[in-house]
């Protein structure tokens, strides 16, 4: 696994809020590349355990706007299999308290974190993907949205 060096990138929404967003480096607000969305939760091609299944459901419920069932299926399956492996390693470490089991758990947890980041499950990763930004909703806009529903 590659080690990160230097400071992590600053998300675009933070740059805009600070007033440091450069138009030649930060995409225009609202610019999103559309990928074909899944129709509901697809079935995985691999057998998943409890933690893997939970992650699978969460990925397709949360990231359905940027995860494509055609191009990203294998990456999502691998992340879900890692989630199962992390659960197994955590249970083993709790049972044994062996330092080798702790190292294995840490390695698997780091790998899962990288896999989730690659899928866009943190603000910096979403910024790199150009798919989502957190925007502040004013009280007036929130009232308008509630009135519509």
Image: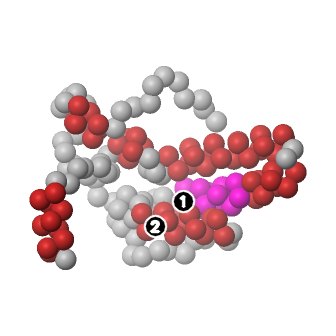
Mark seen at residue 76: 1
Q: Quadrant of residue 123?
A: top left
Principal secondary structure, stretch drawn in magenta = helix
- Label 1 crowd (10 A; few <14 / some 14-19 / many >=20): many
Q: Is the N terminus in the top left, top right, bottom left or bottom right quadrant?
A: top right
Viewer-nearest of discs 1 and 2: 2
What is the count of numbered marks? 2
Q: How is the image coloured?
A: secondary structure
Q: Is residue 76 visible?
A: yes
Image coordinates of residue 33 in percent, x first then y, are 28, 53
Image coordinates of residue 64 in percent, x first then y, are 39, 65
Image coordinates of residue 47 in percent, x first then y, are 67, 71
140 part of magenta stretch: no
85 part of magenta stretch: yes
Left-right relation of 149 to 7: left
- Label 2 crowd (10 A; few <14 / some 14-19 / many >=20): many
Residue at image point 70% right, 54% down: 86
Left-right relation of 33 to 107: left
Q: Is residue 24 visible?
A: no
Provide the residue span drawn in magenta: 75-87
Sequence order check, earlier mark of 1 and 2: 2
Instruction: Name the residue that disc number 2 marks.
Output: 60
């Amino acid at each position: 696994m590659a080690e990160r060096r230097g400071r992590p990138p600053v998300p675009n929404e933070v740059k805009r809020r600070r007033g440091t967003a450069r138009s030649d480096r930060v995409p225009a607000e609202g610019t999103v590349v559309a990928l074909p969305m899944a129709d509901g939760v697809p079935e995985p091609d691999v057998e998943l355990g409890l933690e893997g299944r939970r992650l699978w459901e969460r990925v397709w419920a949360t990231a359905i706007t940027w995860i494509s069932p055609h191009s990203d299926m294998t990456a999502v399956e691998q992340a879900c299999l890692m989630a199962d492996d992390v659960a197994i390693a955590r249970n083993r470490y709790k049972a044994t308290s062996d330092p080798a089991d702790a190292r294995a758990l840490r390695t698997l947890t780091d790998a899962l974190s990288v896999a989730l980041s690659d899928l866009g499950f943190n603000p910096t990763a979403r910024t790199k993907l150009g798919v989502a930004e957190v925007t502040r909703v004013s009280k007036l806009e929130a009232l308008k949205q509630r009135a519509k529903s």
